[in-house]
Amino acid sequence: MGGTCLLHLSAAPVCLRESGEERIRWVAPVWRLSGERIRWVAPVWAPVWKFEGTVELLPFTSHSDAYLPPYAGSVVCLLSRKHRKVASIVPRIFLGLAVAAIAYVVIVAAFQAIGSSLHFHDLLLPRLVDCLVFAWLFWVGSAVGSFLNVVAWRMPRGRSINGLSHCPWCANRLAPRDNWPVFGWLALRGRCRTCRLPISPRYPIVELVVALSLTSLGLAEVYGALANLPFPKELRGHWHGPLSMPVVNRETMAFWLFHTFAVAGAWAFGLVRFDSQRLPKKLVIWVLGAAIIPILIWPPFMVVPWQVVTPDAWAAKSHLDAVVRVLCGLAAAVFVARGLARFVCPSADPKLDPTSAGTGRLMDLIGVLAIPGVIVGWQALFGVTLLATLIAALLLQRFKQLQRDGLAWFSVSLPVALTIQLTFWRELESFPYWPSTQSTPTTILFYALAALTLPWLIRSRVTTPTDDSIDTTASAIDESVGLD
């Protein structure tokens, strides 16, 4: 390649194909090529993509020349995005949160002091502890959500979940300050600090939703010593009114960790299925093992009995009851999944075609439903399924341009319904019109019928029966601008 030439390229985003995958890239408007040297006044970094079956990234510094490998007839595209210094909104967010926390402490303490023998200053410390506990639970939940993002992206693709996150555009590892859940993405304005190319907003959204889910569960169980649970009564505490403080003991921490792992596992299943990927076997084994084995070891984890009507003086102490309770939950999950299969995986046929994509979707649906079936019991599973169906129907109607697969929306709605069931379990258990060990068989049958018929609201709208080939807009966006 001799002489000098100018390449006039469009400044609009173009679609390039890399290893059979389409990725959107920004192409700079004008470049000067001279022999095998490119002279260019550039920002600090700009990736050079050389398409010869592999991709190479070469650094550029301002007012410098960069040698390229031999062309060999390959196509070279120079990609850059202007660096600009943007003011971070994170300090303003933290300031707003601090103001909200102070307002909560002062207003709630003043309100609780009205008509009470307690003074205003006596209630400031408990309300300040509320804010600290909430902040700690939110931080733990957002960290779990960040980890689940990695699990949902890497495990279905057979990649290790070890290692630090890095930008898929310039391959630079994220700095610790940029890897904070939710706030790191906001501080960067959704772009890599090095190459300024976009990072998918899915990551902070997942971190935020999982954080809120686990925070609400933690507040319900840590305050009042498991006051949200209907049984076992010998371990259950109660709310303490204005002076309520978190109760930290062996039983409370055990239940909180057990239920946190269960909800996190449900989120992991949901995120994988939202990308139209099969649930990895290792993930299924780990999640279901974490949900089943603790119940078999310590029966109080089953909370409710397996019988339709709770026996008099029932206590969660029998290992045999624990085994039957787990089996009933798994059987109910299979039963409900077979009912939902008519709408979300109609091509499933475990007998005649056990290896088809439709049957794989059915197996994944059973795994998704097995978590609430084991954790809250077969009785409440029908209510949780119905609630998840209604949430999924609303999300499908609102965001159908993002994902049209009903199973995907149902899978991410089930952790929300499970969180609601666990957070308000005691109130729902005593409500006569919610399926539970205290409700009548008629109520359970009604919810079972509704859970098996209403899923027509989320019937899958995908046009291909091959599960692995369902390339939804959400998956495509995540793959093109995702954080690996």
Image: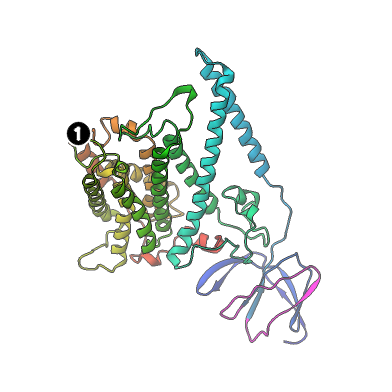
Q: Quadrant of residue 366?
A: bottom left
Of 70 and 107, nearer the camera is 107
| Label 1 Cα neighbours within 10 Å, binned few <14 / some 14-19 / many ≥20 | some
Residue that extends furthest to the right in the rendered view of this protein: 63
In the picture, which quadrant includes the N terminus? bottom right
Of 431 and 244, nearer the camera is 244
Q: Amino acid at mark 1?
A: Thr
Question: In the figure, 273 relative to 205: above or below?
Answer: below
For the point 47% across and 26% down, the residue is: 244
Of 325 and 74, nearer the camera is 325
For the point 68% across and 82% down, the residue is: 69
- Residue 353 pos. (x, y %): 24, 68
Left or right: residue 163 versus residue 373 is right
For the point 67% across and 65% down, the residue is: 11
Confirm whether the magenta stretch covers residue 53: yes
- Residue 267 pos. (x, y %): 42, 51
Left or right: residue 316 versus residue 196 is left
In the picture, which quadrant includes the C terminus? bottom right
Disc 1 designates what residue?
Answer: 440
Residue 306 visible to the viewer: yes
Secondary structure at numbered mark 1: loop
Of 481 and 183, nearer the camera is 183
Residue numbers of the magenta segment: 51-74
Q: Quadrant of residue 345?
A: bottom left
Q: Quadrant of residue 285?
A: bottom left
- Residue 277 pos. (x, y %): 40, 62
Q: Main secondary structure of the magenta part?
A: loop
Left or right: residue 365 versus residue 208 is left
Question: In the figure, 46 relative to 373: above or below?
Answer: below
Residue 473 visible to the viewer: no
